Image (tube, helix red, strand yellow):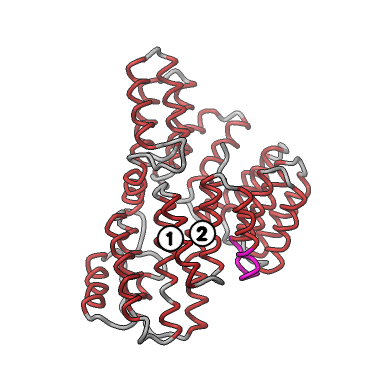
Amino acid sequence: MLQIRRNYTAARQVYRRGVNADCTDAASVFHGLAKLEISQGNVDIARKVLLRGLDKVEDYARFMDTSRHERAVFLVHTLGMLELNSNRAVEAAKVFKTGLEKYERCSQLILGAALCEVKLGSIDKARQLFQQAVRADKRHAQAWQAWGVLESRAGNYTTAKTLFEAGIKSRPRHGALWHAYGVMEGRLGNIENARMLFHKGVQLSPKHVPLYQGWANIELRDDNLQKAKSLIGEALTLDKKEGSSWLVAAQIEKKIGNDGLVGLILRRGIECSPTEASLYRELGEHLVGKGRIGEAREILEKGLEVNPLHAPLYHSLAELEARVFNIEGLAKLNKRASEIFNTNALVPASSSGQAWESNLRMRRQQQQVPGGVTALAEKVGYTHEEDQQHFSDATDLEEEEVVKDLFQDE
């Protein structure tokens, strides 16, 4: 099998040969090419590729066998998630609705539609769709997770507990479910329950880094600082590029009283995870606390360059400018933010899509060809059962990211 690592030009050529060959398994080829373009931050190009792929699938629908025709659901799901990430929730909802007219039992598409409704503020409609998603596929962990987090944020803790436990029963090795359940118990002050959930989650999903982070946060709150340090050390050993681990490590040292280490840890975190916007914010605020305003401004500005969609960075920079009575700076920052964000979810902000593209391009230097891209370039014609499992695996990560973004802390 051809091994493609970082050689995006070669990968793109492989896919384009497939497109030009006009093969009947067009869905796999177009989907692979679109995912490659997304990984490069070429969102508009990816959108065009997906739309063209859907048109091609329609043309071939009469000649395809069932498994290859149903593989077109890849295209629908990725297009919908692309629109959702571009802050085009209305467009995303239309994509998922159209897809569900053909693939009405596809749990991934139903979940996508539910996430759109969350984004649009239609919570009751989102609940109905989450329910449909888990009925369509009881093993769809992200659907259980997203629904549980929704109910938790709404204060329906008993319902959320039931949903998390149902999801864990169906997918006991899915770390994100244990994490979401543990985080909820921690927020409710049920420290022992949270500790037990993180411990069990680590046993069943030992490579899921957020579990160590969540557990370390619990121990930090309970003043078990050495245990917290040990856990976050394990997290960093597993993946030093996981920015949130460095944040927790800095918080632990701050609570211990090792203020001199806090800045060093945050800077090291930025070195290892240069696209983690929260690290820039934390370091910026740390520098403000030391009176190093110019350096703090530089760090916060760099954070916005890395991730223009990270709203807390705007808040921190605005507080800094207000602190030094920089009215002109505040006005420029407000204009910049208004071009990215829009309080009306029905109308995308003018620059939100470009901001997501910028964020993707900043990540590109760290990434290899996304999981499934190389395989899709070479592997065509596997069985329907394999295809369904591959679809589930391929969508897991992007669904978890969207769930995390939609339900992130204020």
Nearest the eye: 7 or 147: 147
Residue under label 1, please give it.
Answer: 95
Residue 329, position in %: x, y? 34, 20
* Residue occupying image coordinates x 22% and y 66%: 9
Nearest the eye: 288 or 337: 337
Residue under label 2, please give it.
Answer: 112
The answer to whether residue 202 is left or right of residue 191 is left
Count neighbours of disc 2 (C-alpha within 10 A) and say few if under 14, some if 14 to 19, many if 20 or more.
many
Q: Is residue 378 above or below residue 152?
A: below
**Residue 279 badge:** none
Amino acid type at image mark 1: Val
Q: Earlier in the sequence, mark 2 or mark 1?
A: 1
Place residue 333 in its image quadrant: top left
Place residue 39 in its image quadrant: bottom left
**Figure label count:** 2
Count neighbours of disc 1 (C-alpha within 10 A) and say few if under 14, some if 14 to 19, many if 20 or more.
many
* Residue occupying image coordinates x 39% and y 68%: 75
Please, what secondary structure does the residue beneath circle 1 have?
helix
Segment colored magenta? 132-142
Nearest the eye: 77 or 123: 123
Please, what secondary structure does the residue beneath circle 2 have?
helix
User: Do the CB atoms of the residues marked 2 and 1 lie less than 8 Å apart?
Assistant: yes
Q: Is residue 133 magenta?
A: yes
